[in-house]
Image: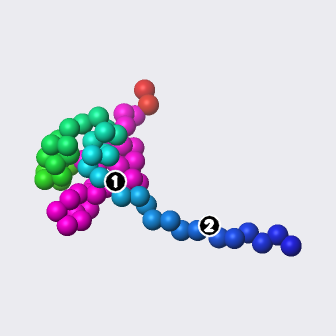
Amino acid sequence: MNVSAAPEWRPDPLLSIDDVAAWLGKPKNTLYAWHSRGKGPRAIRVGNTLRYRRSEVERWLDDHTDAER
């Protein structure tokens, strides 16, 4: 009998602004400016800090990738 277990659900990791700044190679101030202007990856305010879902950063990168030439 082959019973496949459903994959265990895990939450999408929340990244700090330092994590995202290092990933994108941008200063934190750029990310703060993007957030205040409604640009850049969507962020979540947790207390007085910003957190980013990894999937949101990946989606934003996909949306801003040049089309194949």
Amino acid found under the numbered disc labelled 2: Pro
Residue at 15% x, 43% y: name it: 29
Amino acid found under the numbered disc labelled 1: Leu
Q: In terms of image quadrants, where is residue 28?
A: top left
Q: In terms of image quadrants, where is residue 2?
A: bottom right
- The magenta span reads 40-67
Q: Are marks 2 and 1 in contact (CB under 8 Å)?
A: no
Q: Secondary structure at mark 2?
A: loop
Using the image as rendered, state which of residue 32 and residue 18 is in the foreground: 18
Label located before the other in sequence (2 or 1) = 2
Residue at 34% x, 40% y: name it: 23
Q: Is residue 62 magenta?
A: yes
Residue at 13% x, 53% y: name it: 36
**Quadrant holding the N terminus:** bottom right
Q: Is residue 26 above or below residue 50?
A: above
In percent of width and height, residue 55 lies at 41, 54
Residue density around tag 2, few if under 14, some if 14–19, many if 20 or more, within 10 Å: few
Q: Is residue 66 magenta?
A: yes
Q: Secondary structure at mark 1?
A: strand
